[in-house]
Amino acid sequence: MKNIAMTVSLAFLLLTLGACVGTGSWDRKPSSDSEGFPLNHHQILKHLRTANETGKEAVKSGHPPFGAVLVAPDGETVLMKQGNVSLMDHAETVIARQAFVKYAPDYLWTCTLVTTAEPCAMCAGNVYWANIGNVVYGVEEITVKELTGADKKNPTMNLPCRTVFTAGQKPIRVVGPVPELKDELLAPHRAYWK
């Protein structure tokens, strides 16, 4: 019986690792989840730019330049915009919580959260529990960490959102990073984290 349990545990570990290989932040490659994704490339770029403008607005209130938008299933309509509010109220967490109150879970499953930077472990957990089925991020969390360093306003964990989602029971699709917008999305961070 012990051998069966060890074999099952090892098989689960290998499946989990296999799911992360080639799709984790460590690869620094765009995800292959884009096939059949609800947003096309043009929409992804447009919404990332809107999220970036939202992040720039957060800076005017003294907050880090992270921004996110929630996009309706039509791929065009922006349902919500949010910048960072505090160390605990990241843009993605605030949107996920507000969306959960406002929209039905089945509807949220067909929506897409578009965010300038990869959702941290806390934000990924909120996206998961809110039942938002699709995520787009512009730059990796680890890339932002290179700019923020050990700043107390952004105590980054090296825990890719795909790893968090893979640990769950829902097949949340993720597209990111989007290398062609990297410099544009990092510009507000370079100015902020001096």
Image (cartoon, rainbow, N blue to C red):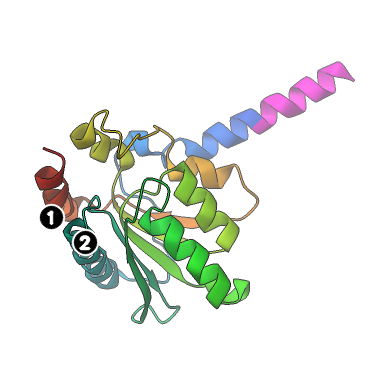
Residue at x 83% of width, y 23% of height:
4
* Quarter assignment of residue 161: top left
Q: Residues within 10 Å of mark 1 (few under 14, many from 20)?
A: some
Q: Amino acid at mark 1?
A: Glu
Q: Nearer the viewer, residue 60 or 51?
A: 60
- Could one spot residue 109 in this view of the protein? no
Q: Residue 181 lies in magenta, yes or no? A: no
Q: Which residue is mark 2?
A: 52
> Horizontal and vertical percent for residue 1?
90, 20
**Main secondary structure type of the part rendered in magenta:** helix
Residue at x 53% of width, y 49% of height:
125
> Horizontal and vertical percent for residue 19?
53, 40
Residue extent of the magenta highlight? 1-12
> Horizontal and vertical percent for residue 10?
68, 24
Q: Provide the secondary structure element on which disc 1 rests.
A: helix
Q: Amino acid at mark 2?
A: Asn
Q: Quadrant of the C terminus?
A: top left
CA separation in Å, label 1 and label 2: 8 Å
Q: Which residue is mark 1?
A: 184
